[in-house]
Amino acid sequence: MSIIDQLAHIEQDALSTLPTISSVEALAEWKSSYLGKQGAIAKLSRELGTLPADQRPAAGQRFNAVRGTLESALSERETVINSAAQNDAFTREAVDVTLPGRPTVVGRLHPSTRVLRMIDGIFAEMGFQVWESPEVETDTLNFELLNIPADHPARDMWDTFYIDTPAGAEKVLLRTHTSPGQIHAMRAHAPNPVRVILPGKCYRYEQVTTRHEMMFHQVEGIAVGQNITFSDLKGTLIGFAERLYGSGTKTRFRPSYFPFTEPSVELDVECFLCKGDGCRVCKHTGWLEISGAGMVHPDVLRNGGYDPAIHSGFAFGMGPERITMLRHGIDDIRWFFSGDERFLEQFV
Ligand code: FA5
Protein backbone atom coordinates (compact mmCIF):
# COMPACT_ATOMS: atom_id res chain seq x y z
CA MET A 1 0.00 0.00 0.00
CA SER A 2 1.38 3.42 -0.93
CA ILE A 3 2.17 6.01 1.74
CA ILE A 4 -0.76 8.14 0.58
CA ASP A 5 -3.12 5.18 0.80
CA GLN A 6 -1.84 4.38 4.24
CA LEU A 7 -2.41 8.01 5.22
CA ALA A 8 -5.99 7.86 3.91
CA HIS A 9 -6.49 4.72 5.92
CA ILE A 10 -5.23 6.38 9.10
CA GLU A 11 -7.44 9.40 8.46
CA GLN A 12 -10.51 7.29 7.98
CA ASP A 13 -9.72 5.20 11.04
CA ALA A 14 -9.22 8.33 13.18
CA LEU A 15 -12.38 10.05 11.98
CA SER A 16 -14.51 6.94 12.50
CA THR A 17 -13.35 6.32 16.09
CA LEU A 18 -13.58 9.98 17.18
CA PRO A 19 -17.41 10.14 17.57
CA THR A 20 -17.29 7.12 19.93
CA ILE A 21 -15.02 9.00 22.37
CA SER A 22 -16.82 10.60 25.30
CA SER A 23 -14.24 11.29 28.00
CA VAL A 24 -11.44 13.85 28.23
CA GLU A 25 -8.94 11.05 29.02
CA ALA A 26 -9.89 8.93 25.98
CA LEU A 27 -9.68 12.02 23.78
CA ALA A 28 -6.13 12.71 24.97
CA GLU A 29 -5.24 9.12 24.11
CA TRP A 30 -6.77 9.48 20.63
CA LYS A 31 -4.80 12.67 20.09
CA SER A 32 -1.48 11.10 21.02
CA SER A 33 -2.07 7.94 18.99
CA TYR A 34 -2.84 9.87 15.78
CA LEU A 35 -1.38 13.36 16.14
CA GLY A 36 1.34 12.85 18.81
CA LYS A 37 5.09 12.79 18.19
CA GLN A 38 5.02 9.00 18.29
CA GLY A 39 1.55 8.87 16.67
CA ALA A 40 0.56 7.11 13.45
CA ILE A 41 0.90 10.19 11.21
CA ALA A 42 4.31 11.19 12.59
CA LYS A 43 5.60 7.64 12.17
CA LEU A 44 4.34 7.43 8.57
CA SER A 45 5.79 10.85 7.71
CA ARG A 46 9.27 9.49 8.47
CA GLU A 47 8.86 7.37 5.33
CA LEU A 48 8.36 10.42 3.09
CA GLY A 49 12.10 10.34 2.34
CA THR A 50 11.68 7.04 0.50
CA LEU A 51 9.42 8.68 -2.12
CA PRO A 52 10.86 9.93 -5.40
CA ALA A 53 11.80 13.61 -5.05
CA ASP A 54 9.12 14.86 -7.44
CA GLN A 55 6.30 13.20 -5.43
CA ARG A 56 7.44 14.49 -2.07
CA PRO A 57 5.90 18.03 -2.14
CA ALA A 58 2.41 16.75 -3.03
CA ALA A 59 2.68 14.01 -0.41
CA GLY A 60 3.85 16.57 2.17
CA GLN A 61 0.84 18.75 1.41
CA ARG A 62 -1.46 15.76 1.80
CA PHE A 63 0.08 15.01 5.22
CA ASN A 64 -0.54 18.63 6.31
CA ALA A 65 -4.13 18.50 5.05
CA VAL A 66 -4.85 15.31 7.01
CA ARG A 67 -3.28 16.79 10.15
CA GLY A 68 -5.47 19.90 9.72
CA THR A 69 -8.60 17.79 9.25
CA LEU A 70 -7.88 15.68 12.35
CA GLU A 71 -6.99 18.73 14.46
CA SER A 72 -10.23 20.53 13.64
CA ALA A 73 -12.24 17.32 14.19
CA LEU A 74 -10.45 16.97 17.55
CA SER A 75 -11.32 20.51 18.65
CA GLU A 76 -14.98 20.05 17.67
CA ARG A 77 -15.15 16.83 19.68
CA GLU A 78 -13.43 18.55 22.60
CA THR A 79 -16.14 21.21 22.66
CA VAL A 80 -18.87 18.56 22.67
CA ILE A 81 -17.23 16.56 25.48
CA ASN A 82 -16.54 19.64 27.64
CA SER A 83 -20.06 20.92 27.41
CA ALA A 84 -21.42 17.45 28.25
CA ALA A 85 -19.11 17.33 31.30
CA GLN A 86 -20.30 20.78 32.35
CA ASN A 87 -23.96 19.83 32.02
CA ASP A 88 -23.25 16.74 34.02
CA ALA A 89 -21.65 18.82 36.79
CA PHE A 90 -24.58 21.23 36.76
CA THR A 91 -26.97 18.35 37.27
CA ARG A 92 -24.87 16.76 39.99
CA GLU A 93 -24.21 19.96 41.91
CA ALA A 94 -27.65 21.45 41.44
CA VAL A 95 -29.19 23.07 44.53
CA ASP A 96 -32.80 22.33 45.27
CA VAL A 97 -34.00 25.78 46.21
CA THR A 98 -37.32 24.38 47.36
CA LEU A 99 -35.71 22.46 50.27
CA PRO A 100 -36.31 24.02 53.69
CA GLY A 101 -33.19 25.86 55.01
CA ARG A 102 -31.06 24.70 57.93
CA PRO A 103 -31.75 26.97 60.90
CA THR A 104 -28.71 28.76 62.35
CA VAL A 105 -28.67 28.57 66.12
CA VAL A 106 -28.06 32.04 67.48
CA GLY A 107 -25.98 32.22 70.65
CA ARG A 108 -27.42 34.12 73.56
CA LEU A 109 -26.35 35.22 77.00
CA HIS A 110 -26.78 32.84 79.92
CA PRO A 111 -29.63 33.99 82.21
CA SER A 112 -27.19 34.47 85.11
CA THR A 113 -24.99 36.70 82.94
CA ARG A 114 -28.03 38.74 81.89
CA VAL A 115 -29.15 39.31 85.47
CA LEU A 116 -25.57 40.02 86.60
CA ARG A 117 -25.29 42.69 83.91
CA MET A 118 -28.65 44.13 84.94
CA ILE A 119 -27.52 44.28 88.59
CA ASP A 120 -24.14 45.81 87.56
CA GLY A 121 -26.04 48.45 85.56
CA ILE A 122 -28.35 49.40 88.43
CA PHE A 123 -25.46 49.79 90.90
CA ALA A 124 -23.37 51.65 88.32
CA GLU A 125 -26.18 54.23 88.13
CA MET A 126 -25.89 54.61 91.90
CA GLY A 127 -22.15 55.30 91.64
CA PHE A 128 -20.75 51.84 92.45
CA GLN A 129 -17.71 50.64 90.50
CA VAL A 130 -17.60 47.00 89.39
CA TRP A 131 -14.68 45.07 90.87
CA GLU A 132 -13.42 41.51 90.65
CA SER A 133 -11.75 39.41 93.32
CA PRO A 134 -10.27 35.89 93.21
CA GLU A 135 -12.38 32.71 93.28
CA VAL A 136 -9.57 30.84 95.04
CA GLU A 137 -8.94 32.34 98.46
CA THR A 138 -7.07 31.68 101.65
CA ASP A 139 -8.90 30.63 104.80
CA THR A 140 -7.75 33.94 106.29
CA LEU A 141 -9.51 36.07 103.69
CA ASN A 142 -12.63 33.95 103.31
CA PHE A 143 -13.15 33.54 107.07
CA GLU A 144 -10.65 34.92 109.61
CA LEU A 145 -10.57 38.55 108.45
CA LEU A 146 -14.37 38.48 108.25
CA ASN A 147 -14.63 37.68 111.94
CA ILE A 148 -15.20 33.95 111.46
CA PRO A 149 -12.39 32.19 113.39
CA ALA A 150 -11.78 28.45 112.93
CA ASP A 151 -13.97 27.37 115.83
CA HIS A 152 -16.84 29.78 115.10
CA PRO A 153 -20.22 28.04 114.76
CA ALA A 154 -21.02 30.28 111.78
CA ARG A 155 -18.54 28.22 109.71
CA ASP A 156 -21.38 25.71 109.38
CA MET A 157 -23.21 28.27 107.23
CA TRP A 158 -20.47 28.02 104.64
CA ASP A 159 -19.59 24.37 103.97
CA THR A 160 -16.31 24.56 102.18
CA PHE A 161 -14.33 22.99 99.33
CA TYR A 162 -10.71 22.99 100.48
CA ILE A 163 -7.79 22.70 98.07
CA ASP A 164 -4.93 20.30 98.86
CA THR A 165 -1.95 22.24 100.23
CA PRO A 166 1.34 21.00 101.76
CA ALA A 167 1.20 20.23 105.50
CA GLY A 168 1.72 23.36 107.56
CA ALA A 169 0.91 25.70 104.64
CA GLU A 170 -2.01 28.09 104.86
CA LYS A 171 -5.39 26.59 103.99
CA VAL A 172 -6.61 27.44 100.49
CA LEU A 173 -10.24 27.09 99.40
CA LEU A 174 -12.83 27.94 96.78
CA ARG A 175 -14.50 31.04 98.16
CA THR A 176 -17.82 30.28 99.80
CA HIS A 177 -19.10 33.82 99.31
CA THR A 178 -17.97 37.03 97.63
CA SER A 179 -17.39 38.69 101.03
CA PRO A 180 -13.55 38.28 100.98
CA GLY A 181 -13.80 40.84 98.17
CA GLN A 182 -14.75 43.37 100.88
CA ILE A 183 -11.24 43.05 102.36
CA HIS A 184 -9.55 43.30 98.93
CA ALA A 185 -11.59 46.40 98.05
CA MET A 186 -11.05 48.13 101.40
CA ARG A 187 -7.30 47.45 101.41
CA ALA A 188 -7.01 48.87 97.88
CA HIS A 189 -8.76 52.11 98.90
CA ALA A 190 -8.13 52.77 102.64
CA PRO A 191 -8.14 55.39 104.05
CA ASN A 192 -10.06 56.86 101.11
CA PRO A 193 -13.75 56.09 100.64
CA VAL A 194 -14.71 52.99 98.67
CA ARG A 195 -17.97 52.14 96.89
CA VAL A 196 -17.83 48.97 94.76
CA ILE A 197 -19.77 45.86 93.86
CA LEU A 198 -18.01 42.52 93.36
CA PRO A 199 -19.94 40.03 91.24
CA GLY A 200 -18.63 36.47 90.83
CA LYS A 201 -18.91 32.75 91.40
CA CYS A 202 -18.99 31.04 94.80
CA TYR A 203 -18.72 27.39 95.77
CA ARG A 204 -20.22 25.46 98.66
CA TYR A 205 -19.96 21.84 99.65
CA GLU A 206 -23.72 21.56 99.88
CA GLN A 207 -26.45 19.08 99.23
CA VAL A 208 -27.77 20.18 95.82
CA THR A 209 -31.49 20.91 96.03
CA THR A 210 -34.08 22.96 94.14
CA ARG A 211 -32.74 26.12 95.83
CA HIS A 212 -29.08 25.20 96.50
CA GLU A 213 -26.31 24.68 93.97
CA MET A 214 -22.67 23.83 94.63
CA MET A 215 -21.66 26.69 92.34
CA PHE A 216 -23.65 29.89 92.10
CA HIS A 217 -23.12 33.63 91.77
CA GLN A 218 -23.21 36.38 94.32
CA VAL A 219 -22.97 40.12 94.02
CA GLU A 220 -21.20 41.67 96.97
CA GLY A 221 -21.44 45.39 97.62
CA ILE A 222 -19.48 47.57 100.00
CA ALA A 223 -19.44 51.29 100.76
CA VAL A 224 -17.07 52.71 103.38
CA GLY A 225 -16.42 56.35 104.21
CA GLN A 226 -17.29 58.93 106.83
CA ASN A 227 -20.84 59.30 108.17
CA ILE A 228 -22.21 56.32 106.29
CA THR A 229 -25.25 55.13 108.20
CA PHE A 230 -27.82 52.37 108.21
CA SER A 231 -30.16 54.78 106.35
CA ASP A 232 -27.68 54.77 103.44
CA LEU A 233 -27.81 50.98 103.39
CA LYS A 234 -31.63 50.99 103.39
CA GLY A 235 -31.86 53.70 100.74
CA THR A 236 -29.40 51.88 98.47
CA LEU A 237 -31.11 48.50 98.70
CA ILE A 238 -34.66 49.92 98.43
CA GLY A 239 -33.53 51.90 95.36
CA PHE A 240 -32.02 48.75 93.91
CA ALA A 241 -35.19 46.67 94.50
CA GLU A 242 -37.37 49.36 92.91
CA ARG A 243 -35.16 49.53 89.84
CA LEU A 244 -35.08 45.75 89.55
CA TYR A 245 -38.74 44.95 90.27
CA GLY A 246 -40.43 48.27 89.41
CA SER A 247 -41.10 51.48 91.33
CA GLY A 248 -43.35 51.15 94.36
CA THR A 249 -42.07 47.61 95.04
CA LYS A 250 -42.49 47.00 98.77
CA THR A 251 -39.44 45.92 100.76
CA ARG A 252 -38.75 44.98 104.36
CA PHE A 253 -35.63 44.48 106.48
CA ARG A 254 -35.51 41.57 108.91
CA PRO A 255 -32.92 41.30 111.67
CA SER A 256 -30.35 38.60 110.92
CA TYR A 257 -26.84 37.55 111.82
CA PHE A 258 -23.55 37.62 109.92
CA PRO A 259 -20.25 37.71 111.86
CA PHE A 260 -18.86 40.45 109.59
CA THR A 261 -21.72 42.96 109.90
CA GLU A 262 -23.31 44.54 112.97
CA PRO A 263 -26.21 45.04 112.92
CA SER A 264 -27.11 42.48 110.24
CA VAL A 265 -30.31 42.26 108.22
CA GLU A 266 -31.91 40.39 105.39
CA LEU A 267 -33.78 42.19 102.65
CA ASP A 268 -37.15 40.87 101.52
CA VAL A 269 -39.16 42.16 98.56
CA GLU A 270 -42.89 41.76 98.18
CA CYS A 271 -43.59 38.67 96.09
CA PHE A 272 -43.78 39.86 92.47
CA LEU A 273 -46.23 37.08 91.64
CA CYS A 274 -48.95 37.37 94.28
CA LYS A 275 -48.21 40.98 95.33
CA GLY A 276 -48.11 39.97 98.98
CA ASP A 277 -51.20 37.76 99.08
CA GLY A 278 -49.16 34.57 99.49
CA CYS A 279 -48.48 31.93 96.83
CA ARG A 280 -46.36 28.87 96.07
CA VAL A 281 -43.33 30.92 94.94
CA CYS A 282 -43.13 32.87 98.24
CA LYS A 283 -44.16 29.85 100.31
CA HIS A 284 -47.34 31.77 101.26
CA THR A 285 -45.47 34.49 103.16
CA GLY A 286 -45.99 37.24 100.57
CA TRP A 287 -42.24 38.04 100.78
CA LEU A 288 -39.08 36.89 99.00
CA GLU A 289 -35.57 37.18 100.43
CA ILE A 290 -33.00 38.65 98.02
CA SER A 291 -29.99 39.79 100.04
CA GLY A 292 -28.01 39.61 103.26
CA ALA A 293 -26.65 42.96 104.46
CA GLY A 294 -25.47 45.03 107.40
CA MET A 295 -23.11 47.68 108.74
CA VAL A 296 -19.48 46.57 108.34
CA HIS A 297 -18.27 45.21 111.71
CA PRO A 298 -15.56 47.39 113.36
CA ASP A 299 -13.10 44.43 113.36
CA VAL A 300 -13.61 43.98 109.63
CA LEU A 301 -13.17 47.72 109.03
CA ARG A 302 -9.85 47.50 110.90
CA ASN A 303 -8.82 44.42 108.85
CA GLY A 304 -9.57 46.45 105.73
CA GLY A 305 -7.31 49.30 106.91
CA TYR A 306 -9.92 51.76 108.24
CA ASP A 307 -10.27 53.28 111.70
CA PRO A 308 -13.78 52.47 112.99
CA ALA A 309 -13.67 55.63 115.12
CA ILE A 310 -13.58 57.67 111.90
CA HIS A 311 -15.05 55.42 109.24
CA SER A 312 -18.20 53.40 108.88
CA GLY A 313 -19.77 51.47 106.03
CA PHE A 314 -22.34 48.99 104.84
CA ALA A 315 -22.11 45.76 102.88
CA PHE A 316 -24.54 43.40 101.21
CA GLY A 317 -24.44 40.10 99.33
CA MET A 318 -27.17 38.89 97.01
CA GLY A 319 -27.74 35.77 94.88
CA PRO A 320 -28.52 36.50 91.20
CA GLU A 321 -29.75 32.95 90.48
CA ARG A 322 -32.34 33.26 93.23
CA ILE A 323 -33.28 36.73 91.92
CA THR A 324 -33.69 35.27 88.40
CA MET A 325 -35.78 32.39 89.75
CA LEU A 326 -38.08 34.89 91.36
CA ARG A 327 -38.33 37.11 88.29
CA HIS A 328 -39.16 34.23 85.95
CA GLY A 329 -40.92 31.76 88.24
CA ILE A 330 -38.15 29.13 87.79
CA ASP A 331 -38.79 26.33 90.26
CA ASP A 332 -35.39 24.60 90.32
CA ILE A 333 -31.93 26.22 90.50
CA ARG A 334 -30.37 23.11 88.87
CA TRP A 335 -31.65 24.28 85.46
CA PHE A 336 -29.08 27.10 85.42
CA PHE A 337 -25.97 24.98 85.02
CA SER A 338 -27.51 21.86 83.48
CA GLY A 339 -26.56 23.06 79.98
CA ASP A 340 -30.06 22.12 78.79
CA GLU A 341 -30.82 24.19 75.69
CA ARG A 342 -34.58 23.93 76.27
CA PHE A 343 -34.06 26.04 79.38
CA LEU A 344 -31.39 28.37 78.02
CA GLU A 345 -33.14 29.26 74.77
CA GLN A 346 -36.08 30.77 76.65
CA PHE A 347 -33.96 33.77 77.64
CA VAL A 348 -33.72 35.88 74.51
C1 FA5 B 1 -23.61 35.30 102.53
O1 FA5 B 1 -23.00 34.56 101.78
C2 FA5 B 1 -23.05 36.61 103.01
N1 FA5 B 1 -21.67 36.70 102.59
C3 FA5 B 1 -23.89 37.75 102.47
C4 FA5 B 1 -23.58 39.08 103.09
C5 FA5 B 1 -22.67 39.93 102.47
C6 FA5 B 1 -24.15 39.48 104.29
C7 FA5 B 1 -22.36 41.17 103.05
C8 FA5 B 1 -23.86 40.69 104.88
C9 FA5 B 1 -22.97 41.52 104.22
P1 FA5 B 1 -25.75 33.83 102.48
O2 FA5 B 1 -25.11 32.57 102.83
O3 FA5 B 1 -27.12 34.08 103.03
O4 FA5 B 1 -24.89 35.06 102.89
O5 FA5 B 1 -25.80 33.96 100.90
C10 FA5 B 1 -26.25 35.13 100.25
C11 FA5 B 1 -27.11 34.78 99.04
O6 FA5 B 1 -26.41 33.90 98.20
C12 FA5 B 1 -28.39 34.04 99.42
O7 FA5 B 1 -29.43 34.94 99.74
C13 FA5 B 1 -28.69 33.31 98.14
O8 FA5 B 1 -29.35 34.17 97.23
C14 FA5 B 1 -27.32 32.99 97.59
N2 FA5 B 1 -26.95 31.60 97.93
C15 FA5 B 1 -26.40 31.13 99.06
N3 FA5 B 1 -26.19 29.81 98.98
C16 FA5 B 1 -26.59 29.43 97.76
C17 FA5 B 1 -26.61 28.18 97.04
N4 FA5 B 1 -26.14 27.07 97.57
N5 FA5 B 1 -27.13 28.17 95.80
C18 FA5 B 1 -27.57 29.32 95.24
N6 FA5 B 1 -27.57 30.52 95.83
C19 FA5 B 1 -27.08 30.59 97.08
Image (spheres, grey):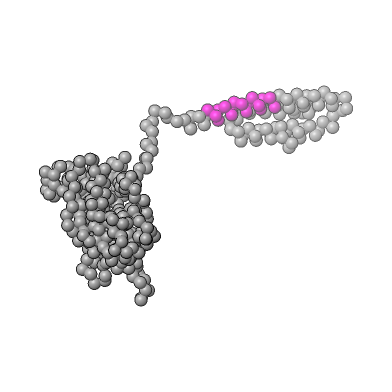
Q: Residue 20 placed where, x, y %?
A: 59, 28
How many discs mark residues in the rendered view?
0
* Rendered position, 171 above or below 290: below
Which segment is the magenta one? Answer: 70-87
- In this view, the residue farthest toward the right is 53
* Rendered position, 121 above or below 8: below
- In this view, the residue farthest toward the bottom is 168
* Rendered position, 244 above or below 313: above
Magenta: predominant secondary structure element? helix
**Residue at figure coordinates x 25%, y 46% from the top left:** 239
**Residue at figure coordinates x 31%, y 61% from the top left:** 310
**Residue at figure coordinates x 71%, y 32% from the top left:** 35
Quadrant position of residue 46:
top right
**Residue at figure coordinates x 77%, y 27% from the top left:** 63
* Rendered position, 246 above or below 142: above
Left or right of 39 on screen, residue 266:
left
Q: Is residue 283 magenta?
A: no
| Residue sitting nearer the eye, 5 or 196 | 196
Residue 164 makes an appearance in the image = yes
| Residue sitting nearer the eye, 195 or 68 | 195
Residue 206 makes an appearance in the image = no
Quadrant position of residue 224:
bottom left
Q: Is residue 75 magenta?
A: yes
Q: Residue 254 placed where, x, y %?
A: 17, 54
Quarter placement of the C terminus? top left
Quarter placement of the N terminus? top right
Q: Residue 130 placed where, x, y %?
A: 36, 51
Q: Residue 170 placed where, x, y %?
A: 35, 72
